[in-house]
Image: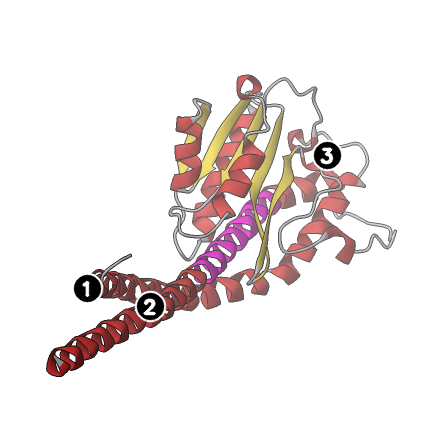
Amino acid sequence: MQSPREIRRRIRSIQATAQITRAMQMVAASKMRKAQEAALAGRPFAHLLYRIQRAATRAGETENPLVEVREVRKRGVILVAADKGLCGALNSNVLRLASQYDPATTVFITAGRRAAQFVARTRRQLAAEFAYGDNPTFAEARAIAGFARDLFLKGEVDEVVVLATRFVNTLSQEPVAVEFLPVGAIKGLAIPGAPRDEVPDDGEEILFEPDAETVLSFLLGHYLNFLVYQVLLNAKASEQSARMVSMKNATDSAETLIKDLTLEYNKLRQGNITKELLEIAGGQSD
């Protein structure tokens, strides 16, 4: 059994930990609100991305190399994870998804330190490593999309897939795989922030001026850039939400433990006081 002094020491240590987790929770909550607003603000545009993608798949014959479907001998994976931990199972879920790809035929483009660490730890092929901040910028997304596009156009990979986390709400984030290239092969997988079943295919006729080739050549590059941008916004909103919830759970657990230890401390202290009083009373009676 622990002495009251040892219990008191544990309580002070846990109180210090609780103060740290509470401060981290407040910081994460502030960042979470900004990240969620950015991710949600981009959802209407994500619906427009689907319209562009549908235009690409329904344009008929086109010579644009971004829609060329090839036999997949080499696959590129854009792996998006957080820079830090302390966000529950967020990183492990998306990295578990990445581990399903064959290391011999897959090259990785990473965004976030945890993604790069995973590739290095598992001795997989790393083509490039990118960073993105707490407020992802379009320039960061354009750099990632441009590198993946160059790999595809040079024939170094036959397909590119994005692995990231889709923001659902504060308590729910889910790992997703989004087919990135070729554009014409995108099917059945939701772009983070715009579930496919929310964008009905109304079967309307699509007319291109001056012609489909010119329009698609202009649009597809922007489509890929904005798609990666939406992925980064969703990943950051997911990260901050998961971290806020994780820190709140840690703070609540610490406070519960403090209450339990305080109760135990008071019982032991009261028992010692009672014992001393009985010894005093017994000594007086003698």
Tell me the amino acid under the disc marked 3: Ala
Report the side of 275 relative to 163 (left or right). left
Residue numbers of the magenta segment: 222-246
Q: Tag 1 or tag 3, which sits nearer the N-term?
A: 1
Residue, far front: 286
Name the one closer to the observer, 256 or 91: 256
The crowd level at tag 2 (other Cα within 10 Å; few <14, some 14-19, many 20+) is some
- Mark nearest the camera among 3 and 1 is 1
Looking at the image, residue 221 lies above or below residue 150: below
Q: Which residue is mark 2?
A: 264
**What's the colour scheme?**
secondary structure
- Identify the residue at horizontal 39%, vertical 43% (top origin): 131
Q: Tag 2 or tag 1, which sits nearer the N-term?
A: 1
- Magenta region, mostly helix, strand or loop? helix
Tell me the amino acid under the disc marked 1: Arg
Q: Position of residue 251 (x, y in %)?
A: 39, 65
Q: Position of residue 173 (x, y in %)?
A: 58, 54
Q: Position of residue 183 (x, y in %)?
A: 68, 37
The crowd level at tag 3 (other Cα within 10 Å; few <14, some 14-19, many 20+) is some
**What distance separates the C-alpha of mark 1 from that of mark 2?**
12 Å
- The disc at residue 185 is 3
In this view of the protein, can residue 145 be seen by the observer? Answer: no
